[in-house]
Amino acid sequence: ASDVYKRQVVGLRPEHVTEPRPHETGEFANFDALLDVVEPMGVETEVFFLIDGQQVCCRIDPRAAVPAGSSMQLSVNLSHMHLIDPGTQLVL
């Protein structure tokens, strides 16, 4: 297989996956997630869901939270996305 098609890992911090925020600048991609855990933390709420069997954590505004077991639209700020080589753990 060519290095051009080498498998990579997407790296994002929880604060860069939120409920859609139209007033923020950046490049965004929206998706729906089935929430496994909803954890109120005061000024923010952490929500957890699975992507390809991997648990993902994101931080949302508490006013946007829905109960665990519900589907929620989330938004990824692609301006903060990193691609990581899984073999070397280096950010590309």
Image (cartoon, rainbow, N blue to C red):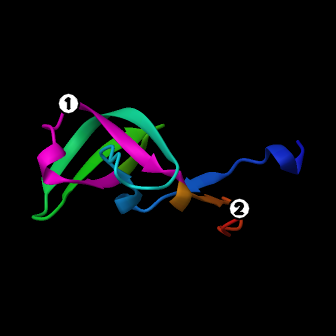
Residue at the image point whose x is 17% and y is 44% from the top: 64
Q: Quadrant of residue 25?
A: bottom left
Task: Please tell me which residue lies in front, 13 or 37.
Answer: 13
Residue pointed to by mark 2: 87
Real-space Cα separation, disc 2 to disc 1, in angstroms: 35 Å
Residue at the image point whose x is 48% and y is 37% from the top: 52
Residue pointed to by mark 1: 70
Residue at the extreme right of the image, as rendered? 2
Q: Quadrant of residue 70?
A: top left
Q: Secondary structure at mark 1?
A: loop
Please say whether residue 15 is one of the residues in the magenta stretch: no
Q: Secondary structure at mark 2?
A: loop
Question: How many numbered callouts?
Answer: 2
Q: Tell me the kind of residue under disc 2.
A: Gly
Residue 45 position within the rendered picture, expressed as x and y whole percent measured from the top left: 18, 56
Say if 87 sits above or below 60 in the image: below
Q: Which residues are magenta?
A: 57-78
Q: Tell me the kind of residue under disc 1.
A: Ser
- Pick the quarter of the image with the C terminus: bottom right
Q: Earlier in the sequence, mark 2 or mark 1?
A: 1
